[in-house]
Amino acid sequence: QVQVVESGGGLVQPGGSLRLSCAASGTIASIGTMGWYRQAPGKQRELVASISSIGTANYADSVQGRYTIARDNAKNTVTLQMNSLEPDDTALYYCNAYIRDIRTLSFRAYWGQGTQVTVSS
């Protein structure tokens, strides 16, 4: 089976930085687009950043210039470097990856369990 696991959340003061990591493992044939979503209390889950298999990155307007997404195809990992964090960035952050399973040879979306990011003084 396939697993997607995030790490790196925590509590940070406004203006600070955090780095989130996500690793996919298991019966993986290939990985397509990987991305990070976030969901704040009372709000819908929203796309923060995504990166294609060839490294093309896209960002939400609210994080453009502050966040950087990167991936390592050899290690099946994706990271999100978050700088100049603001209280509005507080949310549960989820890793998402489109993965082709060796067993089925079909792509589907996999989600991590989420990691909490809290920006507060």
Image: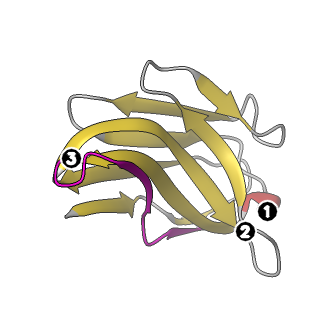
- Which residue is disc 3 drawn over? 28
Answer few, some or many: residues within 10 Å of disc 1's Cα (few below 14, many 20 plus, some between 14 and 19).
Answer: some
In what element is the residue under mark 2? Answer: loop
The residue type indicated by label 1 comes to: Pro
Residues marked 1 and 3 touching at CB (< 8 Å): no
In what element is the residue under mark 3? Answer: strand
User: Up-down: is 30 above or below 46?
Assistant: above
Disc nearer the start of the sequence (1/3): 3
Instruction: Using the image as rendered, state which of residue 116 and residue 50 is in the foreground.
Output: 50
119 relative to 97 in the view: left or right: right
In the rendered structure, find residue 87 and report the number of the disc placed on it: 1
| Marks 1 and 3, how far apart at CA | 36 Å
Q: Residue at x 68, y 47 (%)?
A: 48
Answer few, some or many: residues within 10 Å of disc 3's Cα (few below 14, many 20 plus, some between 14 and 19).
Answer: some
| Marks 2 and 1, how far apart at CA | 6 Å
Relative image position of residue 28 (x, y in whole percent): 21, 46
Answer few, some or many: residues within 10 Å of disc 2's Cα (few below 14, many 20 plus, some between 14 and 19).
Answer: some
Relative image position of residue 90 (x, y in whole percent): 71, 66
- Which residue is disc 2 drawn over? 120
In the rendered view of the protein, which quadrant contains the N terminus? Answer: bottom left
Q: Report which quarter residue 111 is drawn in.
A: bottom left
